[in-house]
Amino acid sequence: MHSTDLLTVMAAQQAGGGQGGGSYSMIIMMVVMFGIMYFILIRPQQKKMKEHQNMLNNLQKGDVVVTRGGVIGKITGIQDNVFTLELQEKVRVRVLKSFIESKFSESGAAAKTDTKKAEPAAEQK
């Protein structure tokens, strides 16, 4: 049998009797792909959004936060969806709640700068 005859026979089998089984396997494959995409992309993103929303709901006056623009300020006032941030003494800015990125901790920032300072000291020895 030539290779062209073999291809013709395979094409006839797929077009005829094999079509019912092929559609089920295609549906199963699409469900499996959707499941994989859900667990890799959608679920972690929903979890991250939920944690961010909980953080926003737990913010209080006196907390130091970072906005999406990189501005660091202390919360001095809270209204419905607007925070008043004090950037410096007597310098206040009103920011929408949705633009607060995270809480700011100086201990984390200090730890990063300390490790940078410690590296050159280790190299000098």
Image: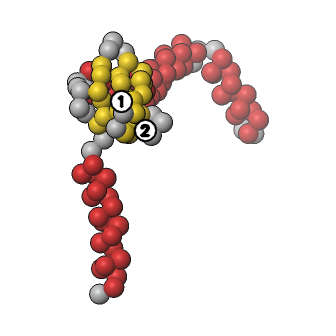
Q: In which quarter of the image is the C terminus?
A: bottom left
Label 1 Cα neighbours within 10 Å, binned few <14 / some 14-19 / many ≥20? many
Disc nearer the start of the sequence (1/2)? 2
Give residue 25's position: percent from left, percent from top.
Answer: 49, 21
Assign a secondary structure to mark 2: loop
Q: Is residue 22 left or right of residue 116?
A: right
Assign a secondary structure to mark 1: strand
Q: Are the residues tagged 1 and 2 within 8 Å (C-beta)?
A: yes
Q: In which quarter of the image is the N terminus?
A: top right
Mark 2 = which residue? Answer: 71
Give residue 83's position: percent from left, percent from top.
Answer: 35, 22
Depicted 17 relative to depicted 105: above or below: above
Report if residue 112 is visible in the image: yes
Q: Is residue 97 left or right of residue 16?
A: left
Depicted 3 relative to depicted 29: above or below: below
Mark 1 = which residue? Answer: 85
Depicted 107 relative to depicted 71: above or below: below
